[in-house]
Image: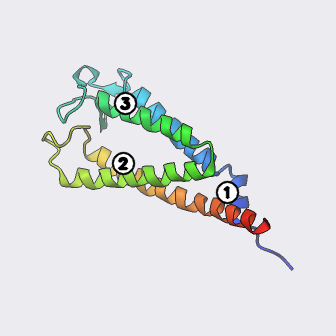
Amino acid sequence: MTTASHPAEHHHMMGLTLHNTAMGVGVVFLLVGVLGFIPGITTNYGAMTFAGHDSGAMLLGVFQVSILHNIVHLLFGVAGLAMARNDRMARLFLLGGGAVYIVLWIYGLVINQETGANFVPFNTADNWLHLILGVAMIGLGAWLGRDAMDETTAARRKM
């Protein structure tokens, strides 16, 4: 007779834990924030403004950035690292951060990108990246968070 192993065992073998995933996402955001301040990696670096749709700087020549945009990435990265310390907070970072990115995607769809409403700023490439990030973060938080919830429930039953 064979028994099916719990999906969490497979996630852990692959290194996919809430802790590792939130930490990895946080590191990526830190890296993106730093890269946004490096001329060459950020094209038109001299045209970077603090904020606003008129910033001409483009991370990797594709994603519109500003000083504010880079700072937001850095802060989001720090939040990811700080919240990766325990499963509950890591799950909250992934789900909440993903929700923020879905809201940013919707915001980007409804605003005129050539107006002051585009204060961060972001362009069409940024906007679609926000959708991908939002869906991925929510998906990972829900998928890996389910394992943490199962483990918490099992621990409570043992008491």
Kind of residue at disc 1: His
- 157 to 145, vertically: above or below: below
For label 3, the residue is 71
Question: Which one is in front in this view, the residue at disc 3 or the one at disc 1?
Answer: 3
Residue type, label 3: Ile
Q: What residue is shown with label 2?
A: 129
Q: State which quarter of the image contains the N terminus.
A: bottom right
Q: Earlier in the sequence, mark 2 or mark 1?
A: 1
Q: Measuring from the top left, give residue 110's x and y in whole percent.
A: 19, 55
Mark 2 and mark 3 lie on one chain; the one further toward the N terminus is: 3
Q: Quadrant of the C terminus?
A: bottom right
Residue drawn at (38%, 26%), measured in percent from left and top?
41
**Amino acid at the residue labelled 2:** Leu
In percent of the image, x 56 and y 45: which residue is there? 22
- Residue furthest toward the front? 159
Q: Please tell me whether mark 2 or mark 3 is closer to you in this view.
A: 3
Circle 1 residue:
11
Under circle 1, the secondary element is: helix
Secondary structure type for disc 2: helix
Q: Is residue 60 visible?
A: no
